[in-house]
Image (spheres, grey):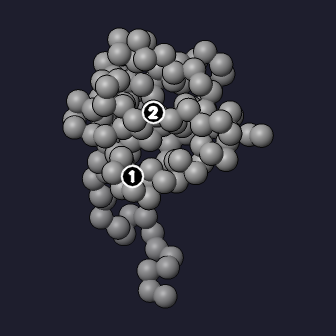
Amino acid sequence: GKGAVMRMGDQDRQAIPAISTGSLGLDIALGIGGLPKGRIVEIYGPESSGKTTLTLSVIAQAQKAGATCAFVDAEHALDPEYAGKLGVNVDDLLVSQPDTGEQALEITDMLVRSNAVDVIIVDSVAALVP
């Protein structure tokens, strides 16, 4: 139909709402001031490269803006004290520590469908593999 194929320049640019990562340099590098809201973002890197720290920083920034956040801890490695030091309000954070990858995905699906949560972190995707 009409508009099925078009030039990217033909469309008006839309402002994409974002959640700050807590790192000004990274927010600038991402081009929109943080991670895009309403999208799936995968943070990939080797072990101990700061992936969980980055996600906790995103949660802290989102909570400061009034967002409801959830952390699906598939690795059972979330340290509430460390999260608190990064600025996470651990009392308001929804946390799940599922027993299986399937359970983690079911919980994540339920959280998404509820529309009651603004940010959902799954740590880690690698832990979901049977």
Place of residue 99 in the rendered image (x, y in percent of width and height, measured from the top left): 65, 36
Q: Residue at x 36, y 38 (%)?
A: 69
Q: Is residue 52 left or right of residue 57?
A: right
The amino acid pointed to by label 1 is Gly
Residue 52: x and y in percent read: 51, 23
Residue 58 at x, y percent in the picture? 37, 30
Taking the view exactly as shown, the residue that stands out farthest to the bottom is: 1
The label number, if any, that marks residue 19 in the structure image: none
- What label sits on residue 38 in the rendered view? 1
Residue 7: % across, % down: 45, 69
SS at badge 1 = loop
Which of pointers 2 and 1 lies earlier in the amino acid sequence?
1
Name the residue located 36 percent from the left edge and 55 percent from the top edge. Answer: 115
The vertical placement of 110 against 101, above or below, is: below
Q: Which secondary structure, mark 2?
A: strand
* Amino acid type indicated by mark 2: Val
Disc on res. 95: 2
Name the quadrant of the C terminus.
Answer: top right
Q: Is residue 113 visible to the viewer in this orientation of the structure?
A: yes
* Image mark count: 2
> Image quadrant of residue 75?
top right
Viewer-nearest of discs 2 and 1? 2
Callout 2 crowding tier (Cα within 10 Å): few <14, some 14–19, many ≥20: some
Q: Residue at x 53, y 24 (%)?
A: 51
